[in-house]
Amino acid sequence: MNKYLNYSVVERKSPRFPDKPGRFYAQSQSRGQVEIKELANRIHRMCTVPMPGIMAVMIAMENVLAEALSQGEIVRLGELGSLYTSVGSRCCRKQEDFTPKMINKVKVLFRTGKELRRCLRRVKFVKVEQRKKR
């Protein structure tokens, strides 16, 4: 099966020079979504584990991942990669003035593992029209 990613070409202007012409960059375009049930179906077709067992493990994994990440742990998913948290905050002039209330966002980041990087190196690209913003 050929693996390919859709992309479109978009213009991005510099915030420092909004009056100057922008430069053009590739932007990935998704081809849809895969929900947890479909993932479970795909796994079921590849192994002998019954569908309810696969769903149970996947739902439990969501809960375990959320718990581990909220406790500040890095979640290593073998050759797939790792999930970890990152924070953003407002700044202050002195270290002793910083308080936890200055942290304004927490996000989960994913670092790809060897297997996923290897798979993505073989991907081909197909140019599509840019989607209209909603």
Image (tube, rainbow, N blue to C red):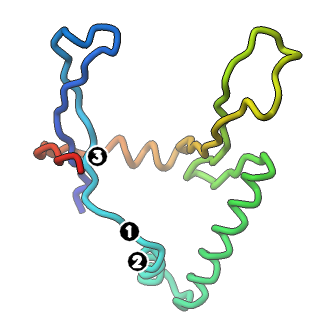
Label disc, if present, on residue 2 of the rendered structure: none
| Residue, disc 3 | 123
- Which type of secondary structure does the marked residue at label 1 adopt? loop
Kindly indicate whether the residue at mark 3 contacts the one at mark 2 (C-beta within 8 angstroms).
no
Image vertical order of residue 94 relative to residue 69, above or below: above
Tally of numbered discs: 3
Q: Which of 22 and 111 is in front in this view?
A: 22
What crowding class fits label 1: few (fewer than 14 Cα within 10 Å), some (14-19), or many (20 or more)? Answer: few
Label disc, if present, on residue 34 of the rendered structure: 1
Q: Which residue is drawn at 45% across and 80% down?
A: 37
Kind of residue sitting beneath label 2: Glu
Kind of residue sitting beneath label 3: Val
Image vertical order of residue 80 relative to residue 13, above or below: below
Q: Quadrant location of residue 52?
A: bottom right
Kindly indicate whether the residue at mark 2 contacts the one at mark 1 (C-beta within 8 angstroms).
yes
Q: Which residue lies furthest to the right in this view?
A: 96
Q: Distance between the residues labelled 2 and 3?
A: 22 Å
Q: Residue at x 19, y 31 (%)?
A: 10
Q: Quadrant location of residue 92?
A: top right
Marks 2, 3: nearer the viewer: 2
Q: Nearer the viewer, residue 8 or 102?
A: 102
Kind of residue sitting beneath label 1: Val
Q: Residue at x 71, y 33 (%)?
A: 103
